[in-house]
Amino acid sequence: MSAHGHVDLGHTVAGWTGTTVALLGFAGAGAAVCAAWPPGILIGLAVVVLAGIVTWLLHLAGWGKPSGPRPESEWDWRTRDTAARAGHADCLGCRAGGPRRAVAAARPRRTVPLPAAGEGA
């Protein structure tokens, strides 16, 4: 059991990839600040923006996850979300993906019961 309880924290290919690219961008921008190289700062910040775009595109491709908890069988970070093509309910990223996804995202989403705070799992 982790410090956060028996829950899915959303570890996905999209999340890990975006975080890694953003970390590289911040590190590059920080190194450029230390080196007093202004173009490097802009390059590092551009990589951070690229991280957001890459994460969003991977989410739309099904490598992200919908909002809320997932069933335990889908907790592996390499599990692809087959419902992502139609869009997730209450997902700003899916609504930004276009009108077809915005309409599909209006459908109700599934719920997963979570154990009470005092229960061991």
Image (cartoon, rainbow, N blue to C red):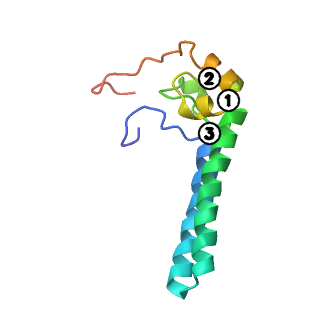
Please state which amino acid type lies under the numbered disc 2: Ala
Residue 96, above or below 19: above
Residue 51 position, x and y percent, is 62, 54
In space, the residues marked 3 and 1 are separated at their CA atoms by 26 Å
Label 3 Cα crowd, 10 Å radius (few <14 / some 14-19 / many 20+): some
Quadrant in which the N terminus is drawn: top left
Q: Which mark is residue 77?
A: 3
Q: Which mark is residue 102?
A: 2
Query: Do the residues under discs 2 and 1 have CB atoms within 8 angstroms?
Result: yes
Please state which amino acid type lies under the numbered disc 3: Trp
Residue 8, above or below 3: above
Q: Secondary structure at mark 1?
A: loop
Q: Secondary structure at mark 2?
A: helix
Q: Quadrant of residue 113?
A: top left
In space, the residues marked 2 and 1 are separated at their CA atoms by 6 Å
Q: Which mark is residue 3?
A: none
Q: Secondary structure at mark 3?
A: loop
Residue 78 visible in rendering: no
Residue 121 lies left or right of residue 77; in this view the side is left
Which residue occupies the extreme top position in the image? Answer: 108
Q: Which mark is residue 98?
A: 1
Residue 112 lies left or right of residue 17; in this view the side is left
Give the number of the mark in front: 3 or 2.
Answer: 2
